[in-house]
Structure formats: C-alpha cells, structure tokens
Image (cartoon, rainbow, N blue to C red):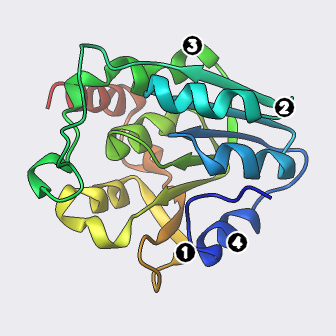
Amino acid sequence: MTVPMMHKKEYGFIESHLKNDMTMLEWGSGGSTLYFPKFVKSYYSIEHDQDWYDKIKPQISDNVNYYHIPSSVPWERPSDWRDNPAHHNTPVELFYDYIDYVDELDVEFDCILVDGRCRVHCAIKALSYLKDDGVLFFHDFYPRKKYGYYDVLYYYDPIGGVSDTTQTVIGLKKKDISLYRSVDSITEELEMFHDL
C-alpha cells in the first residue's frame, strides 16, 4: 500500500479527520494523492512538476481530479536545493498559476492539504474555498517558522497536529475574520499578497 511521504503519525492525524462524504484538495502531489482519496468522496490535486505528475498520474484512483499546473515562467529547481537554505523559499512570482488554479475548480472543500510550492500563499488562497467548518492541513509546519509559515496563524486557529516528528503537520480552522474585517479588505490583502 502506498502511503504519503510523511511519518505515520502525520498521515494518521490527517486521516483521522477524513470522512467518506468529503471533498479534499491538495497542493503538491505524491503518496498523499494515492493514499488519502480512499477516505473521501472526491479528491483534487494540483502539481507543478511535469515529471512527478507523469509518475503519479497512472496510479491515481477514479475519484481523483489531477492537474498539472507548471510554473508561470520557466524554472528549474537548483541541483543543491536540499543543502542550500537560500533555495528553500520558492519565488512566488513563478507560481501564480499554480496557486490560483483553485479558482478554476470553483469547489468548496472540507479539507485542504498544503504540501507543495508557496505554501503560505496557498493557505491564504484556500480561505475562499475551505468550508467554514473545514480543516486545512499544513505539512512541514513547525520546523519552518523562518520561512514565514507561522504567518498563516493570522488567518487560522490550530486544532491539533503532530510536532514530534521530523517533518510535522498542523491542522488549522479558519478564524472568523469577518468579525473584524470586511470581505473587501481581505480581498485587497490577498491581491496585495500576490505582489510581495
């Protein structure tokens, strides 16, 4: 059985929130694309890397809608990306199409997994598509504070997670930001966030 490239505690935490009548989205595909769909009604996955997409595509189940959305401009991952911290933050301007592809789907999701490129941007984009009682799972959250991952806590409240593994995962619920901010101001901020 294929499992996500996560510690079993991490994917177990995600799995514990899934139900067979749910619709789920992920940014960034892999073992998760082959594992989590069996627990939900429908599954959507957005992937930027053509080679990885081609490897995963033949293995997906019938309830998976799988999309290859390449970077907005030509880009190749540096060969030393794992060892060079300068390469760990993905330039957002390369991935606007990838981040925004959820607009094309026009679906409300019960759960969203953020585990690909431009994670903070994807988590903020997800605000418009995650149901009010939905859960956003943010993989690799705890060890990457220096990459701005904790900025999502302005928009989401933690509901649990796994922090005692190498990668970690956190579960988040949307804050009721309508109580203190207008929809127009949130929309303006999301648009401005794209320009950072």
Q: CA distance from mark 1 to mark 3?
A: 30 Å
Q: Is residue 66 above or below residue 182?
A: above
Q: Quadrant of the N terminus?
A: bottom right
Verify CB contact (< 8 Å) between mark 2 and mark 1. Answer: no
Q: Is residue 94 above or below residue 73?
A: below
Three-letter code, disc 4: Gly
Chain-order first, disc 2 or disc 1: 2
Three-letter code, disc 1: Gly
- Hey, which quadrant is residue 118 in on the image? top left
Verify CB contact (< 8 Å) between mark 3 and mark 4. Answer: no
Instruction: Residue 143: tell me if it is visible.
Output: yes
Q: Position of residue 13 (x, y in %)?
A: 66, 71
Q: Which mark is residue 104?
A: 3
Q: Position of residue 34 (x, y in %)?
A: 73, 45
Viewer-proximal residue, 95 or 50?
A: 50
Q: CA distance from mark 4 to mark 1?
A: 10 Å
Q: SS at mark 4?
A: helix
Chain-order first, disc 3 or disc 4: 4
Chain-order first, disc 4 or disc 1: 4
Q: SS at mark 3?
A: helix
Q: SS at mark 1?
A: strand
Crowd around label 4: few <14 · some 14–19 · many ≥20 (10 Å) = few
Q: CA distance from mark 2 to mark 3?
A: 18 Å
- Hey, which quadrant is residue 183 in on the image? top left
Q: Which residue is mark 2?
A: 63
Q: CA distance from mark 4 to mark 2?
A: 21 Å
Q: Position of residue 148 (x, y in %)?
A: 22, 56
Q: Which residue is mark 1?
A: 161
Q: CA distance from mark 3 to mark 4?
A: 30 Å
Three-letter code, disc 3: Glu
Residue at image location 43% in from the left, 48% down from the top: 177
